[in-house]
Image (cartoon, helix red, strand yellow):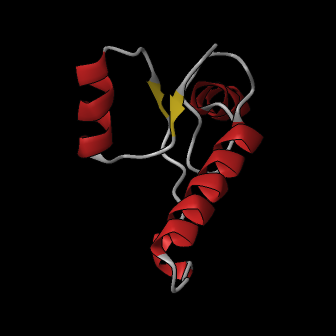
């Protein structure tokens, strides 16, 4: 099973490193300020689900980092270099 951390938080990375769980970092680029809710637990769950869905939608299963617009960043670079 692959664990993907859809966050750029250094605190989340440190927590994963302390536990010793292997993971990939794939920031979702979600605007967290666009989400609002009075209940912090609901807000946290909503943000986590939104990040997971965005990253999963862009993941190609190739093991490469997913780019900010979704899809494999290495594949996007390859496509751009071939277009010229």
Image mark count: 0
Q: Position of residue 76 (x, y in %)?
A: 65, 34
Figure quadrant of residue 4: top right
Q: Is residue 84 rendered to the left or right of residue 44?
A: right
In the displayed structure, 69 sits above or below 47; it is above
Q: Is residue 36 rendered to the left or right of residue 58?
A: left
**Residue at image location 45% in from the left, 21% down from the top:** 23
**Residue at image location 64% in from the left, 46% down from the top:** 52
Give the quarter of the figure containing the N terminus: top right
Viewer-proximal residue, 80 or 3? Answer: 3
Q: Position of residue 10 (x, y in %)?
A: 24, 43
Viewer-proximal residue, 34 or 48? Answer: 48
Viewer-proximal residue, 27 or 78? Answer: 27
Figure quadrant of residue 42: bottom right
In the displayed structure, 81 sits above or below 51; it is above
**Residue at image location 73% in from the left, 20% down from the top:** 61
In the displayed structure, 3 sits above or below 58; it is above
Q: Position of residue 18 (x, y in %)?
A: 23, 22
Q: Is residue 33 rendered to the left or right of residue 34?
A: left
**Residue at image location 50% in from the left, 63% down from the top:** 44
Q: Position of residue 15 (x, y in %)?
A: 27, 33
Residue 84 can be seen in this image: no
In the displayed structure, 34 sits above or below 26; it is below
């Amino acid at each position: 099973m692959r664990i993907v951390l859809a966050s750029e938080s250094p605190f989340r990375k440190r927590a994963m490193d302390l536990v010793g769980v292997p993971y990939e970092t794939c920031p979702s680029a979600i605007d967290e300020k666009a989400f609002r809710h009075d209940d912090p637990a609901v807000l946290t769950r909503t943000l986590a689900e939104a990040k997971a869905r965005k990253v999963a939608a862009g993941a190609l299963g190739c093991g490469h980092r997913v780019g900010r617009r979704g899809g494999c960043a290495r594949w996007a670079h390859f496509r751009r270099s071939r277009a010229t």
